[in-house]
Image (cartoon, rainbow, N blue to C red):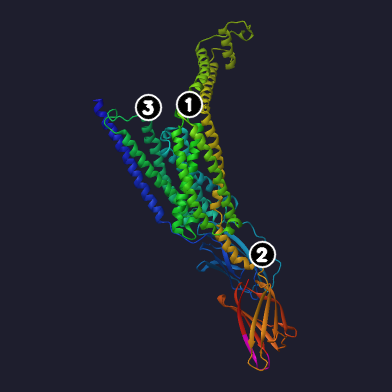
Amino acid sequence: MTQAIAPRAAATTTGGVAFRVRVLLLLLLAVIGAVLAGAAPASAHAALTGSDPQQGAVVSRAPTQVSLTFSEQVAMSDGSVRVLDPKGKRVDTGKATDLGGTTYGVKLHSGLPDGTFTVTYQVVSADSHPVSGAFTFSVGAPSQTSVALSDPAVGGGVVGALYGVGRYVSYAGFILLVGGAAFVLACWQRGAGVRPVQRLVVSGWLALTGATLALLLLRGSYVGSGKVGDIFDLTLLGQVLQTKAGAALVSRLLLLAAGALFIAVLFGAYARRDEADATDGSGKDDASDKGGVDVDAEKRDLTFGLAIGGAVVAAGLAASWAMAEHASTGIQAGLAMPVDVLHLLAVAVWLGGLSTLLVALFRAPAETQIDAVAVRRFSRLAFGSVTVLAATGIYQSWRQVGSWSALTGTWYGQLLLIKIGLVAVLVGIAWISRRWTAQLSEAPRAKVMATAGAKAGTTAGGTALAELRTKQPTKVPANSRNSSAEGSDSRDADSRDANSAGSNSAGSNSGDSRRTAQLARQQAAVATTRQKRLRDADPARAGLRRSVLAEAGVAVVLLAVTTVLTSTEPGRTEEAAQQATSSSSQRSGPLSLKLPFDTGGQDGKGTAEVTLDPARVGGNEMHVFVERPNGKAFDVPEVKVAFTLAAKKIGPLPVTPDRIATGHWSAIGVQIPMAGDWEIAVTVRTSDIDQTTVTKNAKIG
């Protein structure tokens, strides 16, 4: 009867496991489809590339609005752009409007005074990062300003610090969860039943889930007011859920729910199946012993199902970052997102597997110590991960940096160089670990473990003797503490027991409980010491532990640098913004133009040379030299100059220079309000009725 029931029970168990795996796969595929369906590419990390009036410009009349142009579309709210007069008073209407493309504007009040105005902005880029800054322009002439810029609310303060911590924790949790599970399935399947490994993977899931929930709550205040009180504002939370970053965080939570089911199967049915195989003792799967069920095939199917399900969960979690970070913006976003997913998975498999190996070497019980085969498997897996990491990293570096100058001249490029150096150090330490792995073998290990066990057994035997003595009923006389050293062994033992218990009455319940607790502590200490001796017995294993620990230390620093890198403006965008705005902050040098003219009358030919110094936005010094065809000074009655910037519909801005000497005219304080390709028109009058206007384009700024 028992034999008839056993196959049925085994088949039921197999069917239940297979059903759970199928449900897990269907759920994961549905969730990952929803995640990828909502991922739409955008443009690039936001940076201010232009403004009107431009930074440092001096305009003759107060503008009616201030416009800002970014490298990508940004999210704005009331108060995102503020314009302050020289006394620090707001002069804008407060409502920013979309002027089309990537340009946004804010209206100004009328009747503004002359002086220097300050423009501040705090916006959120398409890749979910806060962007803030400030610049000035002047009306009439520059003046002193009493504006004191406060720290930006967007991305700053306590909320900004908490958000940054949440990002670090989320990356660490992802690495431990994905890398730990991959290590168990691909390298050390016995590890599914090892408690320290289980705690590591579950800790990764808890860290990632908690950090994701925290980021979702912090997001509204992080990109808005920056106030701690707004963290639990449900209105802000509703607004966050409608953004790309909010959708990514919600998708991550859904995937983590599926990940919880994956962990339950991995450390539940799968771990029990592996333990059953281990206790079989034969090392073979006999179908007859298992009631006609092919256990080996069943385990392979379960491993395959968990591998597919875990890969889908891991890819979905990585996509939740790719759809909301740098990969979703910039050039080639359609290619960059899957490349970023591969990059994150390679990092997780490498560093997470390294953390799991460290736990296995330091915390796993002696009877379940990791073997050389599992370490070699991880070595090959880590090598493949590093290869993928290098290939995807090269593409990402080209995409985000763009030039050698950005690699060394921007903060993003410098962080990238630090990351490359850390990866090189990790690879070097990993090569040392491979040498220790080659020396790791089971036969010497067993021999050394037996020796260590014998040594530990001596200590254990002493403890057992002490335990036996504590179980013998004894009565200690009141004067036993003053007994002679020549007393019997039994009296000495009884006296020591009484002293260690700290009681005046040997038969009291309090003394018995203290002795029991002391014995339990001694037994635990002996067991811990024995476990440590067994782990430390093999020199090759000890060397491997040291090298893996060094790898883990460097990996922690690498993770910190990577997290900072993901929140830093890419070098390509930063360099483009610097080039776009450099005209307003750097002198371009004197400009000199020669314009031949012919008024049509007698003695009406010559050349007008216009020089502009320093040929930048703001005040300039202009000189006009008029010469005859033979190079001599030409004393003409009148010279006028006008500047026109057709692209911005500015001008003509007339300038009437003063006559300094024969053939020489000059003007001081010629104002150029904006950088661009200006048309310079020179009008020369050679008689009362003969004059002409000649033009030439020149880039100013």
Q: Could you tell me which secondary element the residue under label 2 belongs to?
A: loop
List the residue tagged with mark 1: 444
Residue positioned most to the right: 661
**Residue 555 vertical placement versus 141 (above, below):** above
Residue at 45% across, 55% down? 337
Q: Could you tell me which secondary element the residue under label 3 belongs to?
A: helix
Give the overall secondary structure of the magenta segment: loop
Magenta stretch in the rendered image: 686-693
Q: Would residue 113 be visible to someone looking at this image? A: no
Res 64 → quadrant:
bottom right
List the residue tagged with mark 2: 88
Which mark identifies residue 86? none
List the residue tagged with mark 3: 279
**Left or right relative to 302: residue 60:** right
- Ranked by sequence position, the earlier of labels 3 and 2 is 2
**Left or right relative to 10: residue 371:** right
Q: Could you tell me which secondary element the residue under label 1 belongs to?
A: helix
Three-letter amino acid code at the position of disc 3: Thr
Res 611 → quadrant:
bottom right
Q: Nearer the viewer, mark 1 or mark 2?
A: 1
Distance from label 3 to label 1 (Cα)?
24 Å
Tell me, yes or no, whether the highlighted magenta stretch contains residue 555.
no
Distance from label 1 to label 2 (Cα)?
78 Å
